[in-house]
Amino acid sequence: MNVIDLDNGSIFVGGAGPNYGEPETLLMKYANRHGLIAGATGTGKTVTLQTLAESLSQAGVPVFLADVKGDLAGMAKAGSAEGKLHDSFAKRAEQIGIDLQYQSYPVTFWDVFGEKGHPVRTTPAEMGPLLLARLLNLTDVQEGVLNIAFRVADEQGLALLDLKDLQAMLLWIGQNAADLSLSYGNISAASVGAIQRALLVLEGEGGNKLFGEPALQLSDIIRQDASGKGVINILAADKLMNAPRLYSTFLLWLLSELFEQLPEIGDPAKPVCAFFFDEAHLLFDDAPKALVDKVEQVARLIRSKGVSVWFISQNPTDVPEEILGQLGNRVQHALRAFTAKDQKALRLAAENYRPNPDFDTAEAIQQVGTGEAVTSFLDPKGVPGVVMRTLIRPPFSQLGPITEAERAAIIAASPMDVKYNKTLDRESASELMGKRAAEAAAEAQAVAAPAADDADLWEVGGKPDEKFTRARRYDPKLTIPVNNDGRSGSKSRSDSTKRRSGSDTVLETFGKSVARELGRSAPRIMRGVLGGLFRGR
């Protein structure tokens, strides 16, 4: 039996055997109805994910997935008869009636930190305030201030391309809070400070490496190799999992980019790409309702753009009910029911399947072993199929990690290495603001020079003492002359500045505020500018 049936447009998922029903297949035209892979630790979720990714790639569908444990890197290398699981895989392949065709797949490695793959970046402008607020764990009030920062940046044409741009924008927002509050609502210094502190924490976790240019282009993950196989994009997530909010927010951003940029194509014969969310519970833990609603909307509408989304988690209850209802294809590995809470979760999981009169679904979910699953896929009419007990086909690529040398060789040979290896730093918000501040400071000094000259004109008997004025310019240590009556002369200064008419732009106002501060406390403003505008450079 072939794993890919081009005539029927289907993928072979698992097969029949003693005590099992008919072979299970995933129809390509319904793959974009999304799916769920669930089960307790050690029950075979990773193998199921690997076999599905292999089959989709072989059918020409690009795949993006996160490698949480480092095991999925083996898809870049063919399996082997010397592998420790070869005997069990060979026995299972014979039992379900397929040939064990070991082969490798085209893989591109990505890494937010740029250590185990090509750097993958986005910009604050592309991520937007909603996901950034989620990433920074902001309150509603703080999120409102962040929205104001984005709004003002958009209105003034200030590009927010990295964290230092966002920090510069928040610095200006804080300095001009009184004026902005009249148009945008109250802006407290405490809220601005809290956001800045959250950005520092994110920077300490390495999150600043996520923001910058060149930003990831979707065309670089939605592609095929020369043989027509879909490229499998593997995000190294073992280190990323130490910052779960960063992990979940990045994947949500990528899904939203697919939703916003891909065109509507209806129901294609096969997906444009497949997207796997591992550790899906991290996406929804403590997530605000607005964010869950957005994910639900994306899951509901993105299928018409040809994207197949799969959630992988230990328990189906980790996924909100509204989103779970959008998942038409399901693979349920074993669940253990040791407590009352576990038993309730087991019953709920069983109720999500169309009953099979041959066995009890709840009992089957507890009894299936490693490599087995309770499955349900959409039938040719788009209706959920009767639940089946299924032996999942073994993977054709290597199960487990590859060596560091093998990974490095694959990264070096990829065309993505030249494109994303070096960071770009274009002129953006922080540079524009810094340039305007420098111009304003120079202008302030130029204005102050004539005033300083006027300060040297001391009146003696009501008239300027020109001899003293000239002498004072050459010798600043001269003391103030004394009038005939013994009193010191009065200082006369002319005001050469005039108030400009019209409203100032953000950059002009920012520059003027810097100039005013320079006259008050130079050391303090220098710390503010260098620490706020140019941190991270």
Image (cartoon, rainbow, N blue to C red):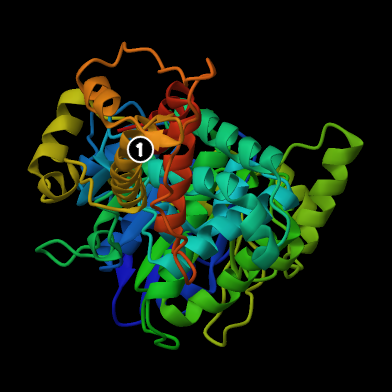
* Location of the N terminus (image quadrant): bottom left
Residue annotated with mark 1: 454
Considering depth in this image, is 245 or 189 the residue closer to the camera?
Answer: 189
Left or right: 441, with 487 as reference point:
left
Considering depth in this image, is 186 or 333 the residue closer to the camera?
Answer: 186
Considering depth in this image, is 366 or 504 the residue closer to the camera?
Answer: 504
Q: Quadrant of residue 268?
A: bottom left
Image point (43%, 59%), residue name: 498
Can residue 359 be seen from the camera position used here?
A: no
Query: Residue 514: horizontal and vertical position, in percent?
Result: 44, 41
Image point (71%, 45%), residue name: 188
Furthest residue in direction right, as rendered: 340
SS of the residue under disc 1: helix
Image point (56%, 36%), residue name: 196
Q: Quadrant of residue 209?
A: top left
Can residue 276 be seen from the camera position used here?
A: yes
Left or right: 331, with 439 as reference point:
right
Work out whether 303 lies above or below 398.
Answer: below
Amino acid, disc 1: Asp
Mark 1 Cα-neighbour bin, 10 Å: few <14, some 14–19, many ≥20: some
Left or right: 431, with 200 as reference point:
left
* Location of the C terminus (image quadrant): top left
Considering depth in this image, is 55 or 210 the residue closer to the camera?
Answer: 210
Query: Residue 323: horizontal and vertical position, in percent?
Result: 67, 65
Query: Residue 310: horizontal and vertical position, in percent?
Result: 52, 59
Image point (29%, 23%), residue name: 468
Query: Residue 333: horizontal and vertical position, in percent?
Result: 62, 47
Work out whether 193 lies above or below 160.
Answer: above
